[in-house]
Image (cartoon, helix red, strand yellow):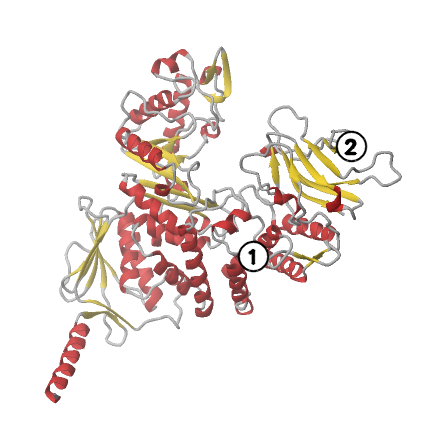
Amino acid sequence: MMLKKYMYIVMIFLSLTSCAQKKVTLYSKEQKIYPKISIPLSANILVERAADEFNNNFKAITGKALTIERSNSLNNNYNYIVLRINPTQKNNYCIYKNDKNITIQATSALNLSYGVNDFFKKYTSLKFKNKNTEPNEDLIVNEIEIPIEFNYCSSPDFEYREPYFSTNFDPNFRGWNRTNYLELEWGIWGHNLSKILKEYSLPQTAYAQVGNQRVEDQFCFTSDTLFKYVNERIGSIYATDSALNKYMILPNDNDIVCTCNTCKAVGNTTTDAAPAVFNFLNSLARNHQELSFFTTAYVTVREIPKFKAATNVGIFYSTIHIQKGIPIEETKDFKDFEYDIKKWRNYVDNVFIWDYTVNFDNYFDIYPSIKVTQKNLKLYKKLGVNGVFLHGSEYDYSTFQDLKTTLFAKLLWDTTINVDQEINTYFHENFPKKLAGALTNYYTFIDNTFFLNKEELGIYSGINKSVKKYLDPKVFFSFYNEFDTNTEKNKYDKDFLKIATALTFLKLEIMRDNGVGTYGFATLDSENQIIVKNETILLLDRLTAFSRASNLKTYNEVNYTIEDYIKSWRQNIFRYHKRKHFFYKKPFKVLSKLDEDYKNIKTLNDAAFGLKDYNTNWLICSVDNLVLKIDKEEIKQSKKITLSFLQDTKHAIFYPSVIEILDTNYKIIKRLKLPSEDENIGTKEVSIDLPTKFDDEQLPNTFIVNIIRSNVVGKNALACDEIIFN
């Protein structure tokens, strides 16, 4: 028995010894072990920069700089970090060690830089946040040990990889996370043909012909003049900066198609501009064979032309109409999407996806779509897509954008990473332990909830849909309280303050949507008075303080300001506090037709108010006026009716023109005509005194409220929020 125990101990010792022997010292301050960096004699400035990158990384964790040696041979008396370029190798970069030297070899200087950073990620303690700072004495290491042998190669799942958040605008972030940036690669991006041509005086023939008229809202892509100027402009852009080797040529963002004789001759129809557009792209591609030209499968470019596309022509496919917070494979759109991608893959060599990763109506909505995006990226890879542009919040801040950008960058390189593990790693590398734990637990929970819940959440959505999808108020309020316990210790941390701003905004949005109750901004007392909670006032004060300290000013795509949001809140709660609401959640009927997406009539008397965002707490009517049938018994204590309306001319929403109170025979009891107003966006309340016993017309036991839409010409809608009898 003792012999067996002894043998067991010996085996453990030998195992530990064996493990220890698998490490070798790369650097030791005490033993004065320093490697040298070797680059070829012919190394250009880009390879020199990769060597400098290695040196800077090394210095960040050791405080020491290494010698960079130009040579095509190595001195056997030293250990080397060998940096080489081999354009013919299969993988983007390889890192290997099977002797005393470490070799990092890549297909290009950029990939060499990626390999350098990957070496430090895998084999040292260097973290991104410490990479470009002065060496921190608390983080300096006196020794670096690495495996005695390793051989590791890496290539990305997608050739083009861009998470379009401001986080990715930092060149240090891109170098560490191996991402692209449109400003550095695209000579023309988006719908910008008009901008690059503004210096030219275009003749009418450069514009689309519809019938017998030339329309300047769209281009004629068989126009020789248009081609001449675009071709000339591309040449001058590329001559100025040879890194700008990609060009996006899009029709203007409308459904106009040129049907002049030459456009019809190449294949255009009244709805399909693809033949003329690809004919235009092919001509550019022949003139600039070193460049790549793209258009988008969008609006009037849908079908494949009958002629071949040049090898340096590609397509961007937008998921804007199918991105609803659910993996595409689990939606009704999957078969059509799969068909489209296969169709384009058979026509062009380069198919890129334009995907979406935020709620553009509310950048502070967390919209935790990481696992949904991961599943979509796996699908894109399987279908042969070779580039992905993930549209984020651009230059504006969105909640947890640094986490999102980091994980999206990792997924664009390798779609198989463990998302939960990466979330944990990110937070613990960037925040104090207690706070990191709270953030990890909550974000992991909501990302999994978002992924598993099959409720749709489009990229233009109100807070009520976010709540249904993933933002459970009970869980969020508990997390907010836990997060808040860290405020005092992190009150000077800008990243913390940005998150605090966003979370406080979100809590107010949930309270606004809930109206009265546990998760609402107010309570209703025994006399049917709305009583605004003290917590609501406190949260508005905190939002003011956090947004100022973090220098955040706007919260959505159209730059609504936080300052105006807070002002609107204060105005509403000032009106609401101690206001009687005899109609709160009382039954009523809607006699008019309701819009397909706006059938929740509870919005009209739930004590939740709307602001300037049409997605939250507004009942929108575009197919009919809004006609309500109400029993007098339900509001018998009331003296007037107060209604709230929104005007948002961009979305064709206008204040009503007339409000009527009618009997059931549609005889007018009261009628108020509203003046038209020019403001593009705003809200207003309208009050009408109810008939008293002294009036000629009395309120019958059942009466009708008829809200008549604006009489503006063309498409128009009515948005009504709370109807209060008080």
Q: Residues within 10 Å of mark 2 (few under 14, many from 20)?
A: some
Q: In the image, which disc is placed on residue 501? A: 1
User: Looking at this view, is 106 or 431 the one in front?
Assistant: 431
- Location of residue 632 with respect to 447 vertically, above or below: above
Is label 2 or label 1 in front? Answer: 2
Q: Give the x, y percent position of residue 83.
A: 22, 55
Q: Is residue 238 left or right of residue 668?
A: left
Judge whether residue 178 can be spotted in this image.
no
User: Looking at this view, is 641 or 3 the one in front?
Assistant: 641
Disc 2/disc 1 C-alpha distance (Å): 44 Å
Q: Is residue 337 left or right of residue 358?
A: left
Q: Residue at x 14, y 85 (%)?
A: 5
Label 2 residue SS: strand
Q: Residue at x 30, y 49 (%)?
A: 413
Give the mark, 2 or 1, whose residue is nearer the N terminus. 1
Q: Give the x, y percent position of residue 508.
A: 60, 55
Residue furthest to the left in view is 3
Q: What residue did someone put label 2 on? A: 671
Label 1 residue SS: helix
Amino acid type, residue under disc 2 in the picture: Arg
Q: Is residue 395 left or right of residue 563?
A: left
Q: Answer yes or no: do the residues labelled 2 and 1 have beta carbons within 8 Å?
A: no
Judge whether residue 267 can be spotted in this image.
yes
Q: Residues within 10 Å of mark 1 (few under 14, many from 20)?
A: many
- Location of residue 407 with respect to 641 vertically, above or below: below
The quarter of the picture where the N terminus appears is bottom left
Q: Quadrant of residue 540?
A: bottom right
Q: Residue at x 20, y 70 (%)?
A: 23
